[in-house]
Amino acid sequence: MKLLNITTKYFLISFLIILLLWSVAFYSIIKGIIYHDVDEFLSNRKTQILEEVKGSPKLLEQNKVVQADYTIEKITGGQAEGLPEHYESIFLQDPVEDELEPYRQLVTTFSTKAGLFKLSIRTTLVGSRELAKIILLNVFILFFVLFVFVVYLNRKLLQKLWRPFYATLHQVNTYRLEQSHPIKFSKTQISEFKELNETIERLIKNNLLSFQNQKRFTENASHEIQTPLAIASNKAELLMQSPDLTEEQAELVHAMTENLSRLSRLNKSLLLLSKIQNNQFQETENIDVQATLKKLFDDLNELTAFKNISLEMTIAGNAVVNMNPDLAEILFGNLVRNAIRHNIENGMVRVKVQKNEVSINNTGLRFEGDTELLFQRFNKNSNHQDSSGLGLSIVKTICDFYQFSISYSVQKNIHEFSIQF
């Protein structure tokens, strides 16, 4: 979730909690104010009724007096002791509306020459409660309008404040070291973003310098190593042609030639890995996988004929991938050669081409190693002396570079490499 959305979410939650608590408190305050005013009215009404009773003692000759807003009942002394003056909220049946309506009631006692009496004075709360509801509703409407306005303002303001950050993020995501130029961020007045941009600029500048130094070193080292290797190999071949060599010396020179040749291949493979990882194969085009494999099969006919290995290709779909043509030949060439090299006499290699997948199956000896280490550099699981242990590592590096998915599986003596585009 984006930081802007997280900030807005916490703001909304906090705002709603505060609004809820404040609404409860506000309603309690309004209710208290209304009850205070009504209770004050009931107290004044009590004084008026007592004055009326004092002026008309005949009213008390009855055991119960019922008027529109009060009731007087004669009670005993024991009843009066358990009946302190108090205010209470009650519900009474409204004969007109035929429903219960809220009332506020004052219950008190008084004494005259005629005895002890209980006085119950009541007044309706319908108008007061409606007033409280209207006030509360208007407050909610006001808060809702404020809430929408503040959320809108907060979101727009935060978007404006975070715009430099997202611009920086976009530039970092699209920047590539092989562009060979430092990154430049737009100016901002926010100190934290300014410090972030300066830090990223320094980091990229240092990485760019290291990348360029590594690239130069790789190119120079490869050239400097390959030249003496070629000279030494040529010298060894000339020495092999010398008529004065003994059989023992010839074997030593032959072993030296093979090791020089292996060292040359190893140097070229390491250079290739470095170039792939440094993105030095930028030219791409749409590669017809079927045509690439067919050409590869034609080139490997002699090798497969020598080992009596059958090459088969099944086309279940037209696979076209956008990649560097040289890397495409290396990718499929390494896999097919690996399938041939690690095959058995009278074995087979079957390649199946689908729209988004290429799978290569081959017969071979049972795999005894750790499959998780299969694509690591210098991981050799065969006795082939000409194997550098880098073939599958190069395949994995190319797949990672183009975000292809490669997998390996084995069932009995059938090995399968599968690439999903």
Image (spheres, rainbow, N blue to C red):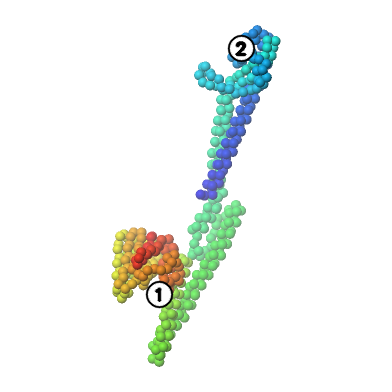
Label 1 belongs to which residue? 383
The quarter of the rendered structure image containing the C terminus is bottom left
Q: Which mark's residue is nearer the viewer, 1 or 2? A: 2
For residue 109, what is the image quadrant?
top right
Position above or below: 398 against 189: below
- Closest to the observer, 128 or 199: 128
SS for tag 1? loop
The amino acid on which the numbered mark 1 sits, given as a three-letter code, is Asn
Disc 1 vs disc 2: Cβ atoms closer than 8 Å?
A: no
Where is residue 198 drawn, in percent x and y?
A: 58, 59
Position above or below: 259 against 295: below
* Residue 90 visible within the image: yes
- Closest to the observer, 150 or 256: 256
Residue 56 bears which disc, if any? none
Q: Which residue lies furthest to the top in this view?
A: 58
Label 2 belongs to which residue? 64
Where is residue 393 drawn, in percent x and y?
A: 43, 68
Q: Is disc 2 surrounded by few (<14), some (14 to 19) or many (20+) residues within 10 Å? A: some
* Residue 299 visible within the image: no
The amino acid on which the numbered mark 2 sits, given as a three-letter code, is Lys
Task: Work out whether mark 1 precedes mark 2 in sequence or the reverse, and give the earlier one.
Answer: 2
Instruction: Determine whether, in the image, residue 32 is placed left or right of residue 169.
Output: right
- Closest to the observer, 212 or 275: 275
x 67%, y 16%: residue = 77
Q: Is disc 1 surrounded by few (<14), some (14 to 19) or many (20+) residues within 10 Å? A: few
x 52%, y 55%: residue = 169
